[in-house]
Amino acid sequence: MAALGEDEVKERLSGLDGWEQKGDAIEKQFQFEDFSGSVDFVNTITPVANEMDHHPDLAISWNTVTVTLSTHSEGGLTENDFELAQKIDGLG
């Protein structure tokens, strides 16, 4: 799957709530009441990511989960990143 051009990235990003472009990735922070809520959320992402065979970078900081998506093998953002972002938004 080829990396998207800058115009395509901007267009797709405009359809996502709270996601921001960070270099060759998109990123969003999700807030929870506590650490357990953060870990539970990460655990809901796992089956979706495995089903797509597309795995995000995840960082947990107590009540905040930062999700970063990029297709490293393509050196940028692909359709898979935006599809997974939409699915993750449906979980939070």
Image: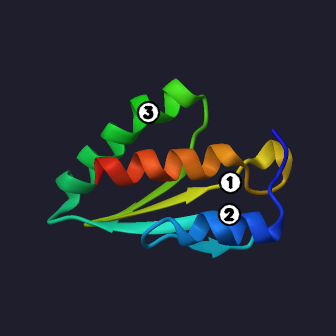
Q: What residue do we see at 66% from left, 74% from top?
A: 22
Question: Mark 1 — residue?
Answer: 70
Q: What residue do we see at 57% from left, 40% from top?
A: 55
Category of crowding for the residue at label 3, using alpha-carbon neighbours closer than 10 angstroms: few (below 14), some (14–19), many (at least 20): some
Instruction: Quadrant for residue 8, please give it.
Output: bottom right
In this rendering, is residue 77 above or below 44? below
Q: Is residue 76 visible?
A: yes
Secondary structure of the residue carrying numbered label 3: helix
CA–CA distance in space, label 2 to label 3: 19 Å
Category of crowding for the residue at label 1, using alpha-carbon neighbours closer than 10 angstroms: few (below 14), some (14–19), many (at least 20): many
Q: Position of residue 68 (x, y in %)?
A: 56, 59
Q: Position of residue 14 (x, y in %)?
A: 56, 72
Q: Any mark on residue 25, and which?
A: 2
CA–CA distance in space, label 3 to label 1: 16 Å
CA–CA distance in space, label 2 to label 1: 5 Å
Give the residue at the far top of this rendering.
51
In this rendering, is residue 11 above or below 87? below
Disc nearer the start of the sequence (2/3):
2
Disc nearer the start of the sequence (2/1):
2
Secondary structure of the residue carrying numbered label 2: strand
Give the position of the N terminus as an image quadrant. top right
Q: Any mark on residue 48, and which?
A: 3
Disc nearer the start of the sequence (3/1):
3
Q: Position of residue 28 (x, y in %)?
A: 47, 67
Give the position of the C terminus as an image quadrant. bottom left
